[in-house]
Structure formats: structure tokens, C-alpha cells
Amino acid sequence: MDSLVGFVGKNYVLMAGDTNAGRSIMRLKDDFDKLVPIDSHKILAKSGEIGDGNQFCNLIIRNVSLYRIRNETELTTKSVAHYTRRQLATAIRKNPYSVNLLLGGYDKKDQKGSLYYLDYLGSSKKINYGAQGYAALFVGSILDRFWNEDLDFEDGLELMKKCLKEVEKRLIIGTRCFLIKMINSDGISVVEKVMINSEKKNEIEEEN
């Protein structure tokens, strides 16, 4: 039941993912971080098989770090997206990874954030906003309606919570918690843990 959402705001990128790790109808844990830091200014958000996601993200992280050590320079978000896409496309013909991704990053040189959509078939597309997993079924219209390129952080956080509440409302099996992270010129920071179910429970108790 993976749900990932991300969009580019004014001088930042905001990303959110549910914290459930499960298999079939079972929830194995509810504190699983699907927003994996690649370096100080990039996040790879993963959905799909847990084992494939962990292995593939480790592959990207180690090779990006190796490139930085060898060349004494950091790859841009665009370069990481191209490298990640190449690894996915190559794996299709050998041992495919069952993983879909959102790559978000902030490049100091360009002084702006960017977001990329990648899937297990090796597709890659730069986007302003997007989602993976079940969230992609529900939040597209909300982002179409409310997103704009000059979205400040406060409005962006409100928009993200609107998307997450819609996911919780539409899914039959509820998601307990979402983790929201931001990437800007200062690096990666955890913004908030959103407990959707607890908010709903409080609203019901107030009505009674």
C-alpha cells in the first residue's frame, strides 16, 4: 500500500511517503522510511517490493558516493536521474527491479529544486509534481488545481496535507502515518509526521 507524493515549490522540493511496510494483507511495521537520502540535497522516494527497493536504493547511493569521491564533485539531480534510469533499463534485461521512484533534489549551482518520475521500465521524466503508488490514483486532480510554481512553504505544506488526507479518505485500508521531508538550499529536513487516522478519530469524538 505504498503512497508517495512530491512537488516543486518556490526554492524547495516537498516530498511525502507513507511509513507502512507490509506484505499481502499484513502490516509488518509502521515506521518504515521510504524517503531515502542519496546525499545532502537529494531524496529517492521508493515504492514497490521492499527488498528490491532497499537493494536498488543502496546501489544508487553507493555509486553516487563513489563518483563524488573519485571526481571530487557532486552529481546534479538531473545526472542522478539519468544514471538511475540507466540502471533500471539495464536491469530489465537481466534481473528487473520491482520498484517505482520519485527523485527530488536541490542544486546549489542552479539555486532551484527539481523532481523526476522514474518507473521499473526505465522511464524517466522531469515533472513539477507527481505521485507513485496508490496516491497516484487520487491526488492528480488536487495538484492540477492548487499547484503553482510560486508556492511558498506554508501553502505547499497545506497542499501536501490536502493530498495525504485525500489518500486516506479514498483507500479502504487506512494508512496510519505519513512522513514529510523538504529539500532546500540548507539540505534535507524532516518537516512533520502526519497521523491521519488519529486526526479522524479526534474529529469523530468531537462530533459525539
Image (tube, helix red, strand yellow):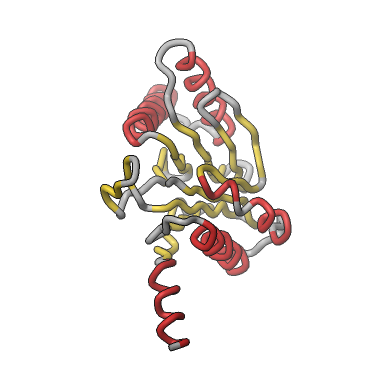
- Side of 8 where 102 appears, left or right: left
Image location (x, y in percent) of residue 169: 52, 63
From what the image shows, is residue 125 above or below residue 133?
A: above
Q: Residue 69 falls in which quadrant of the image? A: top left
- Side of 100 where 130 appears, left or right: right
From what the image shows, is residue 148 above or below residue 62?
A: below
Image location (x, y in percent) of residue 66: 37, 25
Residue at 32%, 40% (x, y): give it: 23
Q: Which residue is nearer to you in this view: 153 or 106?
A: 153
Q: Which residue is nearer to you in this view: 147 or 120?
A: 120
From what the image shows, is residue 43 above or below residue 59?
A: below
Residue at 37%, 26% (x, y): give it: 59
Residue at 43%, 88% (x, y): give it: 208
Q: Residue 122 falls in which quadrant of the image? A: top right
Image location (x, y in percent) of residue 12: 58, 54
- Side of 199 where 132 appears, left or right: right
From what the image shows, is residue 207 above or below residue 166?
A: below
Q: How many marks?
A: 0
Q: Which residue is nearer to you in this view: 90 or 10?
A: 90
Residue at 34%, 34% (x, y): give it: 54
Residue ranking furthest to the left: 28
Q: Residue 50 falls in which quadrant of the image? A: top left
